[in-house]
Image (cartoon, rainbow, N blue to C red):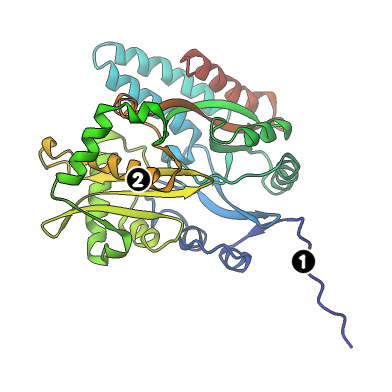
Amino acid sequence: MSDPIQPRPASRVERLDADGLRQSGERSGYLAGLLRSGPTPYIDNARVEMTAVSIDGVVLPLAIAEPGTHNADACSSYSHYVRYTVEELCKRHPGPARWLFRGAFGAYGALLRACSFDRVLFLNNWLLSTNPHQELQADQLRRLAEFLLAHFSGRALVQRNINPDLHPAYGNALAAAGFRLVKSRRVYLLDPAGERFRGSANAALDLRLLARSGHEVIGGERIAETDLPRLAQLYRSLYLDKHSRLNPGLTEAFFALTLRDANFEYRALKHGGQIDGFVVFYEAGGVLTGIIIGHDRSLPIERGLYRQLIAILITEARDRGVLLNLSGGAGEFKQLRGAVPVVEYDAVYDRHLSPRRRLAWWLVTQQGRAWGMA
């Protein structure tokens, strides 16, 4: 008689390909697509290699980034801390000061490149501006770091979107495992049960506008395949054409893949048989996070499409009794609706790197302090 098959130990770290992802029980068609086909069919400015790892049954997508590649800021520390910062400064100061910023950050960027700043392995990176949170303990993080350093030598380990205001225990676990937190950006949290929201006249006006605008709010199940080009066009017009080419370049294939993925929820504003705007969000751990928005910029501003889309997110969070993470950008607008600005961090593990390589992360740590991001 052959020996009985022994169950796989629960405490282990292993690398996954697309087949391994399926066998792990992770049902995200989006993650499977990233591992099977690579990211560029879905995000055309994400030129990274994707893989995944399972730690005690928790699946984390990994993005392997290389220096010298012009990438979206969701998968490039250089794009985030240098290119995007320069763009934002030049928008706020369109006069002669912009040349000063370009010169200063040109020299700063050259120093970071000399330190191979973008030689990074991103943990739990779904290539979105705000990634879903996965909670790990300090011991798991230590074992994960040991495994990754053995398989991906010479890289800084970076996890984006660390929010101690939402997940204080995870920030402590990262610190205990040897990661340090680097200030990354401001995001805006809204409590639909809180006094700031209840006292917001702007939020009340937006909710009334949503109810009376004549738009029908539909869910993802009523968004047809023929609507996918419209979703891609609305998103790219807003995020890439208006704001920055460093935002994730989501394609029609991305929307086709995520529309039927249980991890993501869609809501759209429809009028006269056409989608005029939409939002995508996910809910986890008592927080609803808005990750994607798009609307028809050719329509009159009086239609208030952006206001209605934010009102949809507020309504969803209020009805579910959860907090709302409105992500970054449009800070004044969001604060007038009762949102509170909080700092989001990158968690960085670089203690295994040479002093030259660690210099880069020391510099961006000072950058965050200099901007007074608190």
Name the foreground residue: 307 vs 280. Answer: 307
Furthest toward the bottom, the residue is 1
Mark number for residue 8?
Answer: 1
Q: Position of residue 285 (x, y in %)?
A: 54, 46
Mark number for residue 292?
Answer: 2
Quadrant in which residue 187 is drawn: top left
Quadrant in which residue 20 is drawn: bottom right
Q: Position of residue 101 (x, y in %)?
A: 36, 15
Q: Position of residue 74 (x, y in %)?
A: 45, 40
Whether 337 is drawn above or below 249: the answer is: above
Which of the marked residues, 2 or 1, is nearer the chain's N terminus? 1
Q: What element does badge 2 sit on? A: strand
The residue shown at (39%, 27%) is: 195
Q: What element does badge 1 sit on? A: loop
Name the foreground residue: 254 vs 97. Answer: 254
Where does the N terminus fall, quadrant-wise?
A: bottom right
Q: Amino acid at mark 1?
A: Arg
Q: Amino acid at mark 2?
A: Ile
Whether 87 is drawn above or below 68: the answer is: above
The residue shown at (34%, 62%) is: 256
Name the foreground residue: 360 vs 161. Answer: 161
Q: Is residue 327 left or right of residue 227?
A: right
Q: Residues within 10 Å of mark 2 (few under 14, many from 20)?
A: some
Mark number for residue 303?
Answer: none
How many angstroms separate mark 2 from mark 1 (CA)?
38 Å
The residue shown at (43%, 25%) is: 341
The residue shown at (45%, 27%) is: 185
Is mark 2 in CB contact (under 8 Å) with mark 1?
Answer: no
